[in-house]
Amino acid sequence: MTLAAQHILIVGGGFSGMSAAIELRKLGAEVDLVEIDPGWRNYGAGISLGGATLRAFRQLGILDAFLEHGAAHDGVSLRLPNGAQVAELPTPRIAGPDVPGGGAIMRPVLGRLLADATRAAGTTVRLGCTFTSIEQDAEGVELSFTDGQRRRYDLVIGADGLYSKLRETLFPDAPKPRYTGQACWRAVVPRPPEIRNATMWIGPQVKPGVNPVSKTEMYLFLLEPRPVNEHVDPATFVDQLRGLLADFPAPELQAIRAGLGPTSQVVFRPLEALLMPRPWSKGRIVLIGDTVHATTPHLASGACIGIEDALVLAEEVGRHDRVEAALSAFEARRWERCRMVVENSARLGEIEIDGGDKEEHTGIMRNSLMALAQPI
């Protein structure tokens, strides 16, 4: 096989960067991955995943590990604040007839599964390291690193996230992350037997939900409108989350509220988004994942489209003998799908903030899930 690039560097060890390393190693490329965090940590509580993500896991070779350590199920239940169910969104089994249409897992657990697979694939991983300078010519890219090394590559992949140093270096005029006017609260809580799949309660402006992450645990998420992105004292997290749940008499939510206390681990995150216009590449350097299309969690697809970027990029590197052609084909395949996820997620957030049309909200979710079921 003739590859567009044989010596490849990945900057950033998040989900999309690790996925790119795994797939490119399958092609026989020599892959280095540098990650600035010496502990290679993934922060947060749970992460919801759709069928398209599980399909990607199957290709990556981590689906069985996910099913062992996470939770998989069919359908998304939509309920009123009092608990009455108003809709059940279907989640097609696009990963295969034997795999449920969605699921969830703890973020640190998924990070560990991908890190193990990245190393097992033969990737050279350098932790606590990033680039200090980058120069390219027609034949390659030369970088200096914080560990004192200087190396040359055929292709550099930027997967260093929402606040990407590589994006800022390559495209200094690119859009900056934008605060969306919503924040998300998360906590891991015990899973009662009656919670079998992802479930959301649709309030006028606040939307809580739960999703199983294992046989015994689920994670609570709650979207809240916040006009200003200001500091919130962590000492107030539990009390604020309890207050937000007070308006939802559904028994499941009240049981969660009663169980929140001083030892509860609550995560608070203002929601930011980014959609960088094309091009996503310059010469032999290409950006993927949150670096170019960070989205809010409304469609549970931010990780999905970043991981899919990695799969498609590897396919195009293996399909072409020139880097320019591979990157052009990659962008052409990815733009519309990623744009749809970012913009539809943003619209869902606007509807929630404004207390808008719930039928439009449900329709966008249904149509988006159907679009995500299509091949990549």
Image (spheres, rainbow, N blue to C red):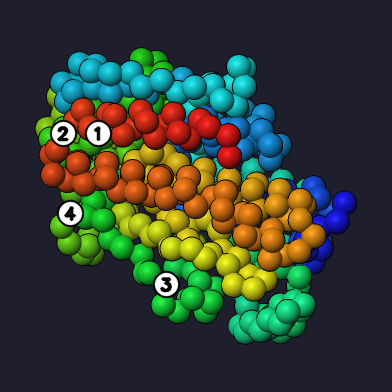
CB contact under 8 Å: marks 4 and 1: no
Q: Dot 2: what SS? A: loop
CB contact under 8 Å: marks 2 and 1: yes
Looking at marks 4 and 1 on the same chain, the residue that comes earlier in the sequence is marked by 4
Q: State whether residue 149 is above or below residue 101.
A: below
Residue at numbered disc 4: 226
Of 114 and 333, the residue lying toward us:
333
CB contact under 8 Å: marks 2 and 4: no
As measured in the structure, the alpha-carbon distance from the residue carrying label 2 to the one carrying label 1 is 6 Å
As measured in the structure, the alpha-carbon distance from the residue carrying label 3 to the one carrying label 2 is 33 Å
Residue at numbered disc 1: 361
Would you call the spot at circle 2 few (<14 residues within 10 Å), some (14-19), or many (20 or more)? few
Would you call the spot at circle 1 few (<14 residues within 10 Å), some (14-19), or many (20 or more)? some
| Type of amino acid under label 2 | Asp
Residue at numbered disc 2: 357
Looking at marks 2 and 4 on the same chain, the residue that comes earlier in the sequence is marked by 4
Q: State whether residue 51 is above or below residue 99.
A: below
Q: Residue at x 48, y 35 (%)?
A: 372
Looking at marks 3 and 2 on the same chain, the residue that comes earlier in the sequence is marked by 3
Q: Dot 3: what SS? A: loop
Label placed on residue 174 = 3
As measured in the structure, the alpha-carbon distance from the residue carrying label 3 to the one carrying label 1 is 30 Å
Measuring from the top left, give residue 196's x and y in whole percent: 41, 18
